[in-house]
Amino acid sequence: MHHQMPGLNTSDYTAAEPLMAIPVATPKALLADKGYDGDRFRESLLVRGILPIIPPRSNRKVPDHPDYRRYRDRNRVERMFAKLKQQRRIATRYDKTVLSFESFLNLAAARLWLKSFVNMA
């Protein structure tokens, strides 16, 4: 049975914990926007040995300021998502199942990746 796609208003924050549980090499740091600034999430990262590079929310009483030089690299990830969302099917999430969406996401990513090999000679 296929899982239904989450709604368009579903926060990515809810997917962060399961994503961090995937058994792959542990990253040294996590670059994220203010939406991920939560004490439990930060503690969870630190327990795993991952440095949270997350700017504080404006309502935080004692703001923890990240390494902003490293945080600048986050724009590369944002640009990649913007390029993927140029594919209408990805941006609108037309697909009804996770498998179908992930499959088209892989195709869109491969298409971007292949462009980097054109005219390399």
Image (tube, grey):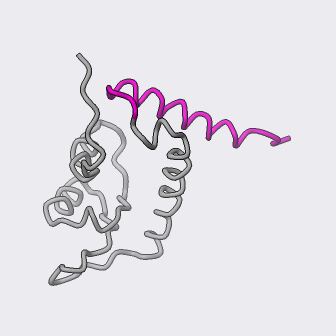
Above or below for 22 versus 11: above
Name the residue located 50 percent from the left edge and 46 percent from the top edge.
85
Depth check, front residue: 110 or 41: 110
Q: Position of residue 25 (x, y in %)?
A: 36, 42
120 drawn magenta: yes
Name the residue located 58 percent from the left edge and 33 percent from the top edge.
110
Name the residue located 45 percent from the left edge and 43 percent from the top edge.
91
- Where residue 59 sits, quadrant-wise, is bottom left
Depth check, front residue: 14 or 49: 14
Q: Which residues are magenta?
A: 94-121
Q: Position of residue 45 (x, y in %)?
A: 23, 57
Q: Position of residue 79 (x, y in %)?
A: 54, 57
Above or below for 73 versus 90: below
Above or below for 113 versus 101: below
Q: Position of residue 27 (x, y in %)?
A: 37, 51
Name the residue located 26 percent from the left edge and 38 percent from the top edge.
6
